[in-house]
Each structure stands twice: as structure tokens, then as C-alpha cells.
Amino acid sequence: MRVALATGVNAPLSLTEREVPEPGPGEVLIKITACGVCFTDLNLVRGHYPFARFPVVPGHEITGTVAALGSGVSGLSVGDPVGAQFLYDSCGHCDYCVSGDQILCPSKRITGIVADGGYAEYGLFKGGYVTPLPAGLDPVAAAPLMCAGLTAFNGLRQAGATPSSRVAVIGSGGIGALAIRYALAMGARVAVIGRSADGAAAAKELGAELYVATRDTDPAAALKAWDGGANVILNAAPSNAAAAATLGGLAPDGTLVLCGYDNTPLTLQAQPMVLNRLRVMASPSGSPHDLRDTLAFSAQHGILPAVTPITLDQAPETLEAMAAGSGGGRRVIAFH
């Protein structure tokens, strides 16, 4: 099988061949149909994860079909369409694991960073972390749901979004565009916050009723004028400063949830938080049950991202383009 390997920090991806592996106990061999190219993959080769294992096959937005099952795997059959996600596995016995919050397990392992991921024609994954794909989901377009979709959906849910909520989304890229669509499908009213007025038309086309360009308008003031503020603000931008600038736009009892962030300190004014009982939280990807819910909701409401298929050979240049700021939309490696 052909694979793309990340061999070290700041090293280009290496295209090579390996033998197709055999699944051991508890493992599932997936013939990979598609794998999304995520900024996490770029951050891997940039050295942002000191716990990374090199060489490693990147990629954690994976769809495919079950090719073989190891002993002890139940609930799956050869030929089943499935997905594999950011969470590769966890310890299985800590309080977080037994309560279904495996994504919070201190011993969790991450697909494509410490365990081989989806930049390959086949991959081995753990049985309890492989999720059946609902009928009707195109496997190429659905690949980013394993990370971007899961992060957006679970972030809204963890922040308490309801059909009566006013939800503001900072950024309308991969996670942001899906968060907008999920919030609308949940019945919420939606505002979008971007840097310039150039994004207004696209946001309105997605269904947002309000667009705020931060180059021209104070986002907190604009949100506060939106019937008293947002109940949930989801930051999908890789900027702590962008998130902090919206805090004053929360309605009382509102929540700012970080799905995007950078490595700078997050500085917030305490007084308005205390006076209005505001909350700030962060939401990592999600656990296996969260992915099942994300995929079911996406299938029910017809929510799929717009993607551009590429070949495995194009993966190295795609990461280079992303690093240069010219990735141009969500790319998905499509096999077979």
C-alpha cells in the first residue's frame, strides 16, 4: 500500500510503500476511501506537538470500509462503511473513559500524531473508536466531519446551544462554516464575525442573519445590540484575541467556547464576567458517542462541507500551500 509519512519537524512528507497490515486483537483494518487534510496535520510537521511520534502517517479525518477484523471486535462487519477520528484510543478504565468522555482521558492517543492515520490506502484502528457511517453520507465529503464537523457540533452542544439561542460564530472556514449550519439546523439564530466585509455575502448565503466585520465594527458592541447579546459565541478562528474581543457581546449567562485558538495568553476582563455570570470554556474534538451524534445529525439535515478531492501525491504540496496561506478551501485525499 502507498502511504505518506511525516518523518520529522519541518521535513516534507515522504511518499513510500508498506505492506498492508494484519489486524490484531481488537483492531479493525480499514480500506481508506478518503482522508481530510486538516491544519492539525500542518501543525504536526511544524513541531507544535512535542508528544508526536515520528515517523507517523498523518491524518485523522478518515472514511473507508472495513477490510478485515481482529479477534474480539463486535458490531462491525467486513464491507461496512465507517469513519475514524482524532481520538485513536484511550485507557478504557479511568473515570472519563467509563463515563463516555474518552476524549478527556489523560492517556488518550491521537490519530495521525502518535498513531498512524489516514494518509494511506489502508489503516489499522481500534474497534471501539471506529464509527459506522450513516446511509447516504458521501464518504469523500463526509471525511472532514470526523474532525471539523465533530468539533463544531460538540462545541455547540457542550456550550449549551438550544433552539432559542442566539449563536455567534467567529470565522467561517472549515469548523466555522459547519458550526453555522449546525446552529441553524438546531433552530438557533446565527451571527457570523469575520475580519472584513468580504465575508458578508457568504455568511448570509449560509443563513446568518447578522454579519460583523471587525475591521469596521466593534464585535462586542454589535453583538450586544443583537437583542441583548449572543447566548453562545463559538470561536472557530485560530486567534485568542479575536475571541477575547467578543466577550462583551455575550448575553448574561452566556458562554464563549474556544474551538480555535493560538499559543498566546487569553486575556479577559473579569468584572463583566462576574456581573453577568459569563462562562469561558474550551472544547476538544469529541468522544466516540459524540461522533455518532454528529454523523447522525449531519445525515438527518444534509450537512456536508464543500471539499476539493486531491490525490495522495498532492498531499505534500497541499500542506506547503496551507503553510503559505494559499490552501484555498478544504482538501480531501480521495483513494481508489
Image (cartoon, rainbow, N blue to C red):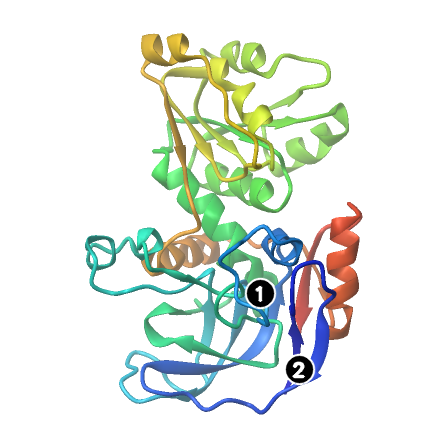
**With respect to residue 215, does 60 lie above or below?**
below
Q: Which amino acid does label 2 sit on?
A: His
Viewer-nearest residue: 124 or 232: 124
Residue drawn at 30 percent across, 89 percent down: 71
For the image, the number of numbered tags is 2
> Residue 305: x, y in percent?
61, 53
Is residue 133 visible in the rendered image? The answer is: yes
**With respect to residue 56, does 323 lie above or below?**
above
Viewer-nearest residue: 98 or 54: 54
* Element type where label 1 sits in the image: loop
Q: In which quarter of the image is residue 198?
A: top right
Left or right placement of residue 162 versus residue 198 in this view: left
Residue drawn at 39 percent across, 52 percent down: 286
* Element type where label 2 sits in the image: loop
Give the numbered dot on residue 170.
none
Left or right placement of residue 202 versus residue 98 in this view: right
Residue drawn at 71 percent across, 58 percent down: 10
Q: Which amino acid does label 1 sit on?
A: Gly
Q: How crowded is mark 2: few (under 14 residues within 10 Å), some or many (20 or more)?
A: few
Q: Quadrant of the N terminus?
A: bottom right
**With respect to residue 156, does 25 lie above or below?**
below
Closer to the eye: label 2 or 1? 1
- Residue that badge 1 annotates: 59
Left or right placement of residue 268 versus residue 71 in this view: right
- Residue that badge 2 annotates: 336
> Residue 245: x, y in percent?
56, 18
> Residue 264: x, y in percent?
57, 31
Q: How crowded is mark 1: few (under 14 residues within 10 Å), some or many (20 or more)?
A: many
> Residue 156: x, y in percent?
42, 38
Q: How far apart are marks 2 and 1 (CA)?
A: 17 Å
Q: Quadrant of the C terminus?
A: bottom right
